[in-house]
Amino acid sequence: MPARSILRIGLLSAIAVFLIAGYAASQQAPPATLPAQEQTSASAQQNSPSEYVLKVTTRLVTVDLIATDSHGNPVRDLKPDDVQVFEARKQREKIEHFQFFEKLKMADASAREPAGVLSNQLPIDRLKIPPMVVLMDSLNTEGPNQLQGRVHVIQLLRTLPKDTPVAVFLLGTSLHILQGFTSDPDLLRAALDRAVAGNMIIKDPVLDTKNASAHFEDTTAGLGVNQGVASQLGEIQNFEKEEYAASVDLRAKETLGALSQIGQYLSGIPGRKILIWASESFPIAMAPDPDTGNNPFAGGREYTEQVRNAANSLTDAQVAVYPMDVRGVQAQQTFSASQSVSRPQAQMTGPQLGRELAEEDLNLQQSQNTMRELAQDTGGKTCASSNDLSGCVLTALKDSSTYYELSFYPQSVEWDGRFHKITLKTTRPGVKLSYRRGFYALDASALAKKQPPEEHLRQACADQLPSTSIPLTVQSGPEDQSSDAQGGLQYLLRISAAGLGTPQEGGSYTFHVRLADCEFAQKDTVFRFHEREMPKSVSGEVYKGWQASGIPYHVALSPAPDTRRVRFAVLDVSSGLTGAIDVPVRASEIAKAAAAPPEPPPGPPPAPVVTTPYVELPDKVKGSSPPKIVASLTFHMGAASSGTLDWSGGTLKYQSAGDMPLQKSAGAFAGYAFGGRFECKDGHFAPVEAGDTEPLLRFTFHNNSGKLVVVDLKGDQPSYIGDLPVDPSAQTLFQQVWQTSHCQGH
């Protein structure tokens, strides 16, 4: 028997379950001196990070645990003392967190964003049934088997509980979403109808009866022993082996990249998720074949490490993979009628047929080994060699609906990136435990530093699916018809502070966050990239408000005429975590979304968020300008005349006392907001010092309920973006400030 058919590839079983991040060193900008006229309503208070921040900034290993009895029924009453965790063969680890989940009994409380607000978080935060993604893989699947896989998935959908949220993806030359999460069977069926794509899979040359080497052997079969002919045949076979290996390289890279992107896309959904991978897969290894070609080592490949890395991304997002081999139970193709008709005479011998049978068995085994590795490493199960694939997949729902989540801090572990096996045991007799097999001792801070922030952000824009690791929302504002480079489309982003590393120094918190906006033209693979840095150092009281409502950031864009959509990508430099959100660029839809009244949230109104009001004035000083904890600004002219801009309540308003002229208050506010850094030169508002930056001309006001408004003076007239209303009295004041900043009347 040929050496290749008896070769056994040793496979390591690995799992990476970590939520870690490091703190990046960052300098805090010195606070500016507040003027005597400012009236502050409360002092800054220190606030500790949320539980989620603790999870992503510590070396905590989290494991999903499925416990069943001898009949396969879930065990619901395990206690932490009933479970023991061991890292490799070392001492027992201390369980820090242990929680039971039974999603089938959870109430459906899906969050809804107000009208005109987009979110990168999938609207299925709390579910009756775990979410399921079906990945139809045409890249690795022959056409007839794609049709067979579609039939299996349709059968599966018929047996699912009616409220199961399902999304359908297609992997072809790239990854596509055919249908977002829905429970509508008609929409899912329509998506599956589009999930069959043409494919040209290069076959293993040993099994390909129509390739060049088979034809060459058949035409030279009567020449007897001829060294020249044998050499030519060997070169042809070398080429065919390398061509086949290169095609598998490409399939493996695209497939594992798509699986990793799906993990990032689902990371924003808490808890366990299900990924059904309907495919023929690709071989996890291809051993050298000494029986063909002049080079016995040509065409050898091994993808175990790449598969393990993809599993790492999936387990990090708590995604369990359930591969479905769409071939089901099948007879060996060597003896099929289609093969026999086209088989060359040279391949009709007994030894050659035996070799092909062995090769076919080995290819099937190696492709299913890829599936088994992913399933085992992510806590799933392989559905193969069965015609009841839908029944097999139903176990995924059972596993993902009832499970335990436990966490521990590994002791005596060097965080050098190596894989560490874990073992879970239970003192309860008759209980079977299923869990992920280990973790990577990865130092997130070191990993984040290996890739420059710009490259990390570019990758976040290039990914087919937006990452949901950092929650984002975006609200579009009114269009600015000016031709200024800072005008155009206005957006207000809110970045979840809970997903970011927050180094604390004294009573302040420092964020090291980068933002990029990527403008996509007609082709999805082409985008224009603009990077922004957002240094933020805030007091504990401001940080408390940000935890409740998110970090606000205003962006003004002037997209090119051919732009179809904009992706905003956020990077936490300390941890390497990203979040991204896509916004369609259609002027009419943006205007409509901005004008639509917000829909009232279901149920009773939420309790008000009480924070200290503050204002952000980016043009006040050079470099980072920390927010000013203040509820109002009062400007005096003599003892009896004053003007006050107040945003502590439900609106941003201006009130005057005595005979205070509006122009005086506007001039005083402009002088304070710009800090004397700009002046009118030749009819243009320009920096006083050469080399200083151009003014941004925007101010952000935050009230005591967590609402805000961005006042933008860059365009032809002031614009207001946010959920804090601006009273006409304040609009009149800002019209005067706009005239000052545009050098009108000078």
Image: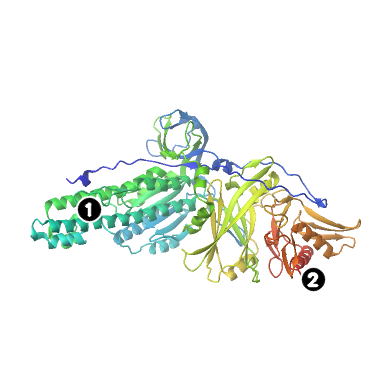
Looking at the rendering, in which quadrant would you find the C terminus? Answer: bottom right
Foreground residue among 86 and 392 = 86
Question: Can you name the residue that lies furthest to the front here?
Answer: 690
Q: Is residue 476 left or right of residue 141?
A: right
Q: Is residue 710 left or right of residue 162?
A: right
The mark found on residue 474 in the picture is none
Foreground residue among 106 and 51 = 51
Q: Residue tagged by mark 1? A: 331
Helix, strand or loop at mark 2: loop
Amino acid type, residue under disc 2 in the picture: Gly
Amino acid type, residue under disc 1 in the picture: Ala
Looking at the rendering, in which quadrant would you find the N terminus? Answer: top left
Q: Residue tagged by mark 2? A: 745
Q: Where does the image place residue 689, in percent across and percent down from the top left?
A: 72, 59
Res 546 seen here = yes
Would you call the spot at circle 1 few (<14 residues within 10 Å), some (14-19), or many (20 or more)?
few
